[in-house]
Image: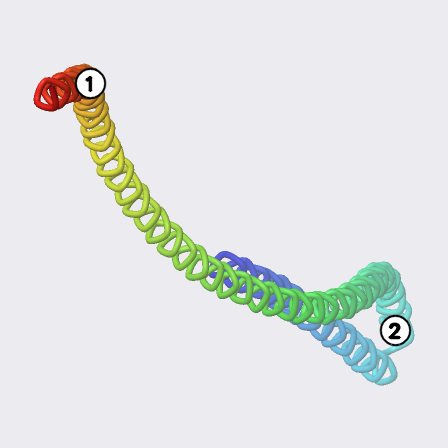
Amino acid sequence: EIQLKNEACAFREEAVQHLEDAIEAIKKLEKLRRHTLELLEEETIKNSNLRLKLQNLPEMVTKELEALVAAACDSNTAKINELQTALKNITSEIESLNQKQILCETQNAAMCKEQEWLWVQHGEAVDLLNQQMAQKANTNILLNEFCNKKRDAEQEIIKLMNAVQEVKDGLAKEIKIFNDEEEMWARKNAEMKTKLDLQKIKTSEKKDEFENLSLKLLAVQSEIAENTTI
């Protein structure tokens, strides 16, 4: 924006300087044209005065003076022609400078319009840039919020994973304890079963022995009864 302002100021200063130079040249040419007209008027007045003086002089002197006046007139005519040519050139130069001035003013007006258009474009570009910057700021805010939420979610996931790992570790310990206890009870059950089996064997043996003894007792009792009867 500052660069564009500097360029616009430099352009205006250059255009103004060019117009001022053209105006100054026109003033100088106008001054020279007026001076030439004054010289022509002076020569015309001098010729008129000489003609008036000739009317009052004798014939011989008049002829000599006429010759001198004719020569002077020829010289003055050449000078006048030269001055008229210079005047035409000056007039032509003034017209050329006027045309250049008009062209410069036209170009300046066009450039001013172009400058106004550039300022409008610059304003629109600045507005668009501000809009993009605001959108970028909003995007950054949303991105920061998303990053914060993502970080919080990651931390929450880490906490949950740690909690799950703790549960897994605790469950593994409990399973190990359960397995150890199960093995222990299995051993105890095996030992108890062995003892029960031995006890059953002993009981069966005792039962057989009891039955044998009972049979023997019955036999003895029967024998005693028979002996008693006799």
- Per the image, the residue denoted by label 1 is 215
Q: Quadrant of residue 145?
A: bottom left
Q: Is residue 50 above or below residue 119?
A: below
Marks 2/1: CA–CA distance: 215 Å
Residue 153 percent coordinates (x, y): 37, 52
Q: Mark 2 = which residue?
A: 62
Mark 2 neighbour class, 10 Å CA radius: few under 14, some 14 to 19, many 20 or more: some
Please state which amino acid type lies under the numbered disc 1. Leu
Percent coordinates x, y for residue 53 in the rendering:
80, 82
Which residue is pictured at 62% across the width and 63% down the height?
A: 15
SS assignment at label 1: helix
Q: Position of residue 151 (x, y in %)?
A: 34, 49
Q: Measured from the top left, where is residue 169 in percent x and y?
A: 24, 34
Q: Of residues 104 and 1, which is closer to you in this image?
A: 1
Query: Can see residue 187?
Result: no
Of 205 and 30, nearer the camera is 205
Instruction: Tell me the quadrant of the picture where the C terminus can be found.
Output: top left
Q: Secondary structure at mark 2?
A: helix
Q: Is residue 218 left or right of residue 65?
A: left
